[in-house]
């Protein structure tokens, strides 16, 4: 019998330190009005002492608690991150050790699309019978990759983690997934260093990222709906990567999805890269917006470019 990968638990964690747009005004030539109008972001959380693994542990424990399972019941852990604590070992194995799991664990790097790539990988394991319970985590300390003197990027990014527990289910779960990459645009969004032992910061061609993101994400949403024989009216919620309100609004407009059906957290979280979708999902599950049986579209794009989307029955 076909197995589905069903979400049975969600969790998230944000570091306590809040950096508002007004805080940034003190060190950068910028202002709250410009940042809110161009990005939709009012504040973001930034780590002080915590690492990517620390954030992941908190989010994972919250997700495991909601799922009602112990870490030692997990068959697989996939951690999507752009900001691993060390080059090796994988942050996923550090997480595994901290939560007490005894299964394979690996990191996956697809920048802001990392969570969708990780969910798609977990889905394959579950549907092929290779795993029954999988922990999928997006955890990021993007503030480490940002030049705090660069106003074009320092305003955008934040730190945080989100986690999902997937379980093999006979009835429903992830209905469709698609991931894509196009390496022709590497220089549009990358870190500045060429070697791992050199210091590097995010460099971005904002306008180009904006246009490609809207184009690729709208096409992906339309194709996904067509392949599932659905329309936007069948969607209960869109949970997009929280990069920028103008990207999200433009995609919603292109696919004719009312903004009332879009889960937004970027005003308080900023762009947390691979963590942004599971963070937003957890917020909307816990505040009661997302309910059992809802049809969700999750989608995101990041450096590479890499992008992807999932259609999920919650
Ligand atoms: N505060 C005030 N003014 C600023 C700031 C700032 N933080 N940054 C740039 N400006 C100025 C520029 O210098 C420019 O001034 P000028 O007209 O005198 O030359 C003016 O504002 C307009 O600059 P643009 O770069 O054209 O501004 P734009 O409207 O494109 O907005 C932004 C910039 C917000 C980065 C936009 O391009 C964008 O949203 N791009 C998408 C990028 C993104 O979301 N990246 C996230 C990572 S990728 C991902 O997650 C999908």
Image (tube, rainbow, N blue to C red):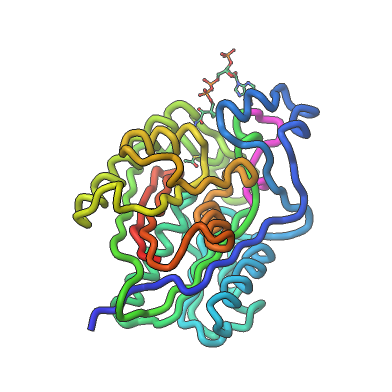
- Residue 106: tell me if it is visible: no
Horizontal and vertical percent for residue 288? 54, 61
Residue nearest the observer in this picture, 56 or 238 = 238
**Residue at image coords 48%, 60%:** 290
Q: Is residue 264 above or below residue 278?
A: above
Quadrant of the picture in which ligand 1 is shown: top right
- Residue 265: percent from left, percent from top: 57, 47
Q: Is residue 185 above or below residue 234?
A: above
Residue at the (44%, 73%) spot, across then down: 166
Give the mark count. 0
In the shown orientation, is residue 163 left or right of residue 54? left
Rendering quarter of residue 126: bottom left
| Residue at (44% x, 40% y) in the render | 259
Q: In the rendered view, does 282 fall on the left or right side of 300?
A: right
User: Is residue 59 depicted above or below 181 in this figure?
Assistant: below
Query: Residue 242's spot in the image, x, y percent?
Result: 52, 45
The quarter of the image holding the C terminus is bottom left
Q: Is residue 18 magenta?
A: no
The image quadrant where one finds the N terminus is bottom left
The one nearer the camera, 225 or 213, is: 225
Where does the magenta region start and end? Answer: 141-151
Q: Is residue 147 magenta?
A: yes
Answer with the quarter of the image where residue 266 lies: top right
Res. 139 visible in picture = yes
Can you give x and y, in whole percent of width and height, for residue 251 in the image? 38, 37
């Amino acid at each position: 019998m076909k197995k589905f990968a069903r979400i049975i638990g969600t969790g998230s964690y944000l570091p306590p330190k809040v950096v508002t747009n007004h805080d940034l005004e003190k060190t950068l030539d910028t202002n709250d009005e410009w940042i809110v109008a161009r990005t939709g972001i009012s504040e973001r959380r930034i780590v002080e002492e915590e690492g990517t693994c620390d954030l992941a542990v908190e989010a994972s424990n919250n997700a495991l608690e909601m799922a009602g399972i112990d870490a030692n019941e997990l068959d697989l852990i996939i951690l999507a991150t752009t900001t691993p604590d060390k080059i090796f070992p994988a942050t996923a194995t550090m997480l595994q050790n901290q939560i007490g799991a005894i299964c394979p664990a690996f990191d996956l790097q697809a920048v802001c699309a990392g969570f969708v790539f990780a969910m798609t990988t977990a889905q394959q394991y579950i549907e092929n019978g290779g795993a029954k319970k999988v922990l999928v985590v997006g955890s990021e300390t993007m503030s480490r990759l940002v030049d705090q003197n660069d106003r074009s990027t320092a305003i955008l990014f934040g730190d945080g983690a989100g986690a999902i527990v997937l379980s093999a289910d006979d009835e429903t779960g992830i209905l469709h997934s698609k991931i894509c990459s196009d390496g022709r645009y590497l220089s549009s969004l990358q870190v500045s260093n060429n070697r791992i032992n050199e210091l590097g910061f995010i460099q971005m061609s904002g306008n180009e990222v904006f246009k490609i993101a809207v184009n690729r994400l709208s096409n992906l949403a339309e194709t996904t709906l067509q392949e599932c024989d659905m329309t936007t009216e069948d969607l209960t919620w869109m949970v997009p990567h929280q990069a920028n309100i103008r990207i999200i609004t433009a995609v919603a407009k292109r696919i004719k999805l009312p903004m009332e059906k879009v889960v937004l957290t970027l005003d308080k979280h900023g762009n947390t890269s691979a963590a942004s979708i599971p963070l937003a999902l957890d917020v909307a599950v816990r505040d009661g917006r997302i309910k059992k049986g809802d049809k969700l579209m999750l989608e995101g794009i990041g450096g590479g470019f890499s992008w992807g989307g999932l259609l999920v029955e919650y």
